[in-house]
Amino acid sequence: MHQDHVINAPSSNTSKLIMDDEEVYIWGSSDTTPIQGVYLKDRLFTSQGHLGYDEKMVRKHVEHRNEKGLVENDTKVEEAIEKSGWKHDGQVVANSILRFFHGDDRELS
């Protein structure tokens, strides 16, 4: 299902916006998406996933992409629909985003 994805976390070697002494953390991964998101203390929080998607939205999205011929095969469609109802860490990720925007991560080391 992933057409676009991050294959390497950014670093001072790949971006002038990241200093040599700053560490970029990969905060989540899976077998299919090794980089779910990256974090740079007090500066950057990204997410590969669509955080606002619930099971119903995922199903509609998969069906729409399938109708347009954007999915490799029926097996991928079936897998995506099956996974749409799986337990996830959405609440944990949402809490982390709120902590980031409220500046609560400034005290972390």
Image (cartoon, helix red, strand yellow):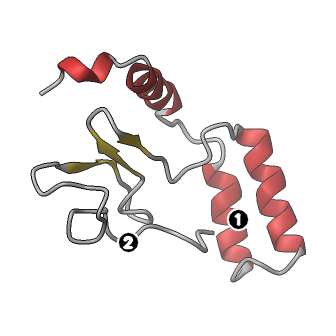
In the picture provided, is 45 more to the left or to the right than 4? left
Which quadrant of the figure has residue 35?
A: bottom left
Nearer-the-camera pick, 43 or 33: 43
x, y (%) of residue 3? 61, 74
Q: Which residue is mark 2?
A: 7
State left or right for residue 100 relative to residue 74.
left
Q: Quadrant of residue 17?
A: bottom left
82 shown above or below 96:
below
In the image, residue 25 sits, relative to residue 66, either above or below, namely: above
Q: Tell me which label, 1 or 2, sits earlier in the chain.
A: 2
**Element assignment for label 2:** loop
User: Which residue is denoted by mark 1 in the rendering?
Assistant: 78
Which residue appears farthest toward the right when viewing the image?
67
Query: Which amino acid type corresponds to the residue marked 2 in the rendered image?
Result: Ile
Closer-to-camera residue (91/56)? 91
Residue 59: percent from left, percent from top: 78, 51
Rendered view: 81 above or below 43:
below
Tag 1: Cα neighbours inside 10 Å, few (<14), some, or many (≥20)?
A: few
At x 69%, y 41%, the residue is 53
Write the residue at 50% across / 25% down: 91
Residue 39 shown left or right of residue 92 in the figure = left
Q: Identity of the amino acid at label 1?
A: Glu
* Residue nearest the observer in this picture, 84 or 28: 28
Nearer the observer, 41 or 7: 41
> Helix or strand or loop: what does disc 1 sit on?
helix
Number of other residues with Cα within 10 Å of mark 2, as a class: few under 14, some 14 to 19, many 20 or more: few
Name the spot of residue 1 as percent of width and height, x first.
63, 69
Q: Quadrant of residue 109?
A: top left
Compared to 49, does 43 lie above or below?
above
